[in-house]
Amino acid sequence: MKNILITGAAGGLGIALVNEYLSRGFRIFAADIVPEEEALSRLPDEKDRLFYLPTDVTDTGAVDALARFVSARTDSLDIIISAAGIIRPESEDLLEDFDIDGSIRLFDVNALGPLRIAKAMIGLLRAGKDKVLVNISSEAGSMTSHADYIMRYDYCMSKAALNIQSVILQRYLKPEGIRVLLINPGWMHTPMGGPDAPVDPADSARGIAELAEELRGNLDRYMYWNYNKTERPW
Ligand SMILES: NC(=O)c1ccc[n+]([C@@H]2O[C@H](COP(=O)([O-])OP(=O)(O)OC[C@H]3O[C@@H](n4cnc5c(N)ncnc54)[C@H](OP(=O)(O)O)[C@@H]3O)[C@@H](O)[C@H]2O)c1
C-alpha cells in the first residue's frame, strides 16, 4: 500500500486531498494544528488507513514528533503534500500602517512550515516509490500574475519564498529521483477562500493527485502548475 503525508489535512483542501487519496487506495498520515477530536469529526472514519496527529508546522519539535509517528507505522512515504497555510485579512494599508510584526507567524507557517516538513520527512520519502513532494503554493507566489493579491505583502511574500525554496529543494533532490512540485490549487470555496470562490476543493484535489502521478520521475518538466494542469508563470 502506498503512503502519503498531508499537512493542513483538517482544512478545506486537506479534507479533499484525504478523500482523493483514500479513493486511490493510499494509507494516509494526516496532520493539522486542529485538535484531534475536531479533526476526526471532519475527516472520514477510516481507522485502518487514516492516521491523524495534531501538529503545528511552526513547531520543530512537533514536526519531529510527526516524523516519529509516521516512522512507527511505515518505513516509507511515497508522497508528501504540504497544504497547511494561513492568510490574514487583506490590508488597504499600502505601507505606513502595515502590520509587519503580525506577518511573522504567517511567514513561519506558509514558508518555513513546508521546509520543516521536508527536512523531517526526507528519509521516509527517499525510501518511497513515487518520491513526490508537493508544496501547495498560490497564484500569490507568482511575480507576474498576482494582481488580485497586490495588497497582501505577507501572503504573497510567503508563497514566493515557498516557490524559491522548492526550486532549491528540487535542485538538491533531483539526483535522487525526487520530484518537487509547486501547485496553485485555485481560488477554492474553503474556510480560507470563502463561499464565493469558484473552485470546488474536490476538483483541486483531483488535479493535484493527477499532476503528482503524471509528473513523478519526470524531473526535467516544469515545476509550478495550476491544479487544472496548466503551467503557472513564475
Ligand atoms: N482557498 C484558496 O482559495 C487558496 C488559494 C490559493 C492557495 N491556497 C493554499 O491552499 C492551502 C490550503 O488552503 P485551504 O483553502 O484549504 O485553507 P483552510 O481551509 O484554512 O485550511 C488550512 C488548514 O491549515 C491549518 N493550519 C493553520 N496553521 C497551521 C499550522 N501552524 N500548522 C498546521 N496546520 C495549520 C488550518 O487550521 P486553522 O483553521 O485552525 O487555522 C487549516 O485546517 C494553503 O496553503 C493556502 O495558502 C488556498
Image (tube, grey):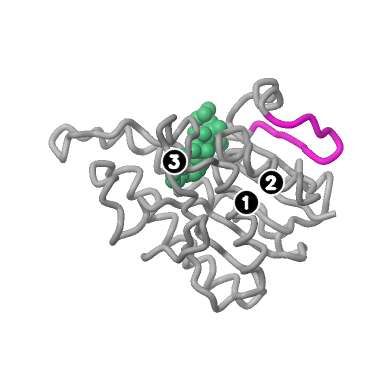
Secondary structure category for the residue under label 1? helix
- Residue 233, can we see it? yes
- The part of the image, by quadrant, that contains residue 118 is bottom right
Q: Is residue 38 above or below residue 28?
A: above
Q: Earlier in the sequence, mark 1 or mark 2?
A: 2
Q: Residues within 10 Å of mark 3 (few under 14, many from 20)?
A: few
- Left or right, 97 with respect to 2, comes to left
Q: CA distance from mark 1 to mark 3?
A: 16 Å
Measured as percent of width and height from the top left, residue 34 is found at 60, 27
- The part of the image, by quadrant, that contains residue 75 is bottom right
Measured as percent of width and height from the top left, residue 149 is found at 29, 45
Q: CA distance from mark 1 to mark 2?
A: 6 Å
Question: Mark 2 is on which residue type?
Answer: Glu
Secondary structure category for the residue under label 3? loop
**The disc label shown at residue 20, or none:** 2
Question: Mark 1 is on which residue type?
Answer: Arg
Measured as percent of width and height from the top left, residue 102 is found at 32, 32
Secondary structure category for the residue under label 2? helix
- Residue sitting at x 39%, y 36%: 87
Viewport quadrant of the C terminus:
bottom left
Q: Are the two marked residues, 1 and 2, in contact with CB atoms closer than 8 angstroms?
A: yes
The residue segment tinted magenta is 43-54
- Left or right, 188 with respect to 143, comes to right
Q: Earlier in the sequence, mark 1 or mark 3?
A: 3
> Marks 3 and 2: which is nearer the front?
3
Question: Mark 3 highlights which residue?
Answer: 198
Q: Residue furthest left?
A: 96
**The disc label shown at residue 206, or none:** 1
**Closest to the observer: 149 or 72?**
149
- Left or right, 63 with respect to 144, comes to right
Q: Is residue 84 above or below residue 38?
A: below
